[in-house]
Amino acid sequence: MPKYTVYLSKRAKKELDKLSDSNAQPILSAIANLAEDPRPNGCKKLKGRDGFRIRIGNYRVIYEVIDSQLIVDVITLGHRKDIYD
């Protein structure tokens, strides 16, 4: 299976910078794993907009997959109570 390139949006980077290291580490490793498998077990297709969601504890990562260019574009991430606004 070809490897995807993962891009983080400015918004995703800003949200990641706000998190403590203990919360950011599992999220970073989950994002890195998207390069190997952009649709891992447990990912959900979002309703009402393009993209997918993965869960990492109480945090969510929202991203789009562009298969034609082998790109995973991380749109945003955050705590589950704030992410869907």
Image: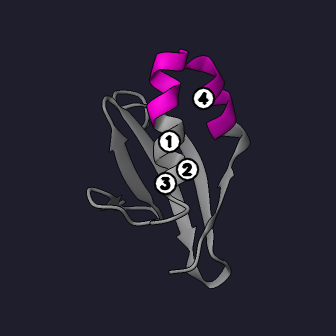
Task: Calculate the distance from the C-alpha at mark 4 to the C-alpha at mark 3.
Answer: 16 Å
Mark 3 residue element: helix
The amino acid type, in three-letter code, at marker 2 is: Ala
- Whether pointer 3 and pointer 1 mark residues with C-beta atoms closer than 8 Å, the reply is yes
Q: Are marks 3 and 2 in contact (CB under 8 Å)?
A: yes
The circle on residue 32 is 2
Label placed on residue 33: 3
Q: Quadrant of residue 44?
A: bottom left
In the displayed structure, 71 sits above or below 54; it is below
Q: Quadrant of residue 85?
A: top left
As measured in the structure, the alpha-carbon distance from the residue carrying label 3 to the one carrying label 2 is 4 Å
Q: Which residue is under mark 4?
A: 16
Q: Amino acid at mark 1?
A: Ser
Identified at 52% across, 48% down, the residue is 31
Q: CA distance from mark 4 to mark 1?
A: 12 Å
Name the residue carrying label 1: 29
Residue 28 position in % (x across, y down): 54, 38
> What residue span does the magenta drawing correspond to?
12-26
Residue at the spot 36% in from the left edge and 60% down from the top edge: 46
Q: Is residue 9 above or below residue 14?
A: below
- 3D distance between C-alphas at marks 3 and 1: 6 Å
